[in-house]
Each structure stands twice: as structure tokens, then as C-alpha cells.
Image (spheres, rainbow, N blue to C red):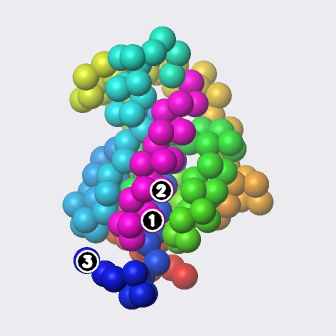
Amino acid sequence: MPGAAEERRQPWLCVLAGRAGTGKSTLAKQLTWVTGACYLRVDAVEAALSGVQDHVGAAGYVVAHEVAASNLLLGVDVIVDAVNGVPEARAGWRETADRCGARLILLETVLPDPAEHRRRVESREADIPGHQVPTWVEVQADGWVPWDEARDGTRVVIDTTHSEQALRAAMAAFQAP
């Protein structure tokens, strides 16, 4: 364990954002296996909270920010898997990274083919107890706010049509300054 006087390397916080069914969880898990970072899935936090309170709302993100911060402050890299569909959610991760002195890497997953996106959404099954996956109609009406780099920060857009290419593109984002 490093001593208090020893200098630690700067941890990074990689935040995946994107609409449901665009491959965030798949890519986040692949990145976790490759990097050994802490994997933090907001769906899991929200599902757990829904078991103890009726309305989760922003509480899932609040809890996830603190879990991410506790790891980052120990020097542990963190990968966050969450929709991050609104500017407030995106700003929260920037604030968490700043508070912890972490490098922030923002990745937005996209699936350009609407038919493939719909197929993926409609074929998904919940993999977390208590989690309800959204329907295609719900995904279309999810309130996703398009990314604005001036407001939300610079992100790398990852086309997840092909898993191996998506992983390579995401790993290249880690090399960027």
C-alpha cells in the first residue's frame, strides 16, 4: 500500500453514455476486462434502490457518484455504465472527476442503424434482479438530450455496430491526451 508521502498516478473516470440498447453495458464490461478498472453500472444501483424506496429518480446517480469517488480517491480507475441522457447527469460526472483529481474520458455509444437498434432493444432481457429493460416505445420517448460539447464536454462517439471495432475505438480514447 502506498505511503501518504508517495505520489500516486492520476486515476481516470471513463463514463459511457448512450440511449438504451446501444451497447453501453457490453462495451463497459469489455473495457473493464481489458483495463481491470472498477465497473459501476447505474442500472444495478437503481434496481437495488427500487427495492427499498418507491421512487428512485436521481438517487441512483447520486449513489453512483459517491461510489465512483470513493474508488477514484483510492487511485482506482472507474468505468461508469449509464444512459446519462440529460446535461445534468453528464455534468455530475465532470464534477466527480474534478473533485477527485481524475482524468475524465467520455464515450457516447451510438447505433446508426435504427432497425438494428430496435432489434437489440426488443431482444434484451434483464440481467439484474428487479431491473426492467425499456421497450422500444420507451426508448424512443426517453427524453434523450443530444450532446453539446460546449455544455457536456468533449466525448468520443463509438459506433457499436461491430463489437471488436467499438472496443478498439474506445481503447484509442484512453490514449488521447
Figure quadrant of residue 23: top left
The amino acid pointed to by label 3 is Met
Task: Report whether residue 8 is seen.
Answer: yes
Which comes sooner in the sequence, label 2 or label 3? 3
Numbered disc 1: secondary structure: loop
The residue singled out by tag 1 in the image is 73
Secondary structure mostly taken by the magenta-highlighted segment of the chain: helix
Residue 9 inside the magenta-drawn segment: no
In percent of the image, x 60 and y 38: which residue is there? 85
In percent of the image, x 52 and y 69: which residue is there? 102
The residue singled out by tag 3 in the image is 1
The residue singled out by tag 2 in the image is 69
Magenta-drawn segment: 57-77
The amino acid pointed to by label 2 is Ala
Q: How many marks?
A: 3
Residue 71 inside the magenta-drawn segment: yes
Q: Label 3: few (<14), some or many (≥20) within 10 Å?
A: few
Q: Find residue 171 and report its horizontal and vertical position in percent.
A: 37, 70
Residue 35 against residue 10 in the figure, above or below: above
Q: Find residue 75 and report its horizontal and vertical position in percent.
A: 39, 70
Between 165 and 7, the one nearer to me in the picture: 7
The amino acid pointed to by label 1 is Leu
Mark 3–mark 1 distance (CA, rounded to whole Å):
14 Å
Q: Label 2: few (<14), some or many (≥20) within 10 Å?
A: many
Mark 2–mark 1 distance (CA, rounded to whole Å):
6 Å
Q: Nearer the viewer, mark 2 or mark 3?
A: 3
Figure quadrant of residue 131: top left
In percent of the image, x 37 and y 42: which residue is there? 41
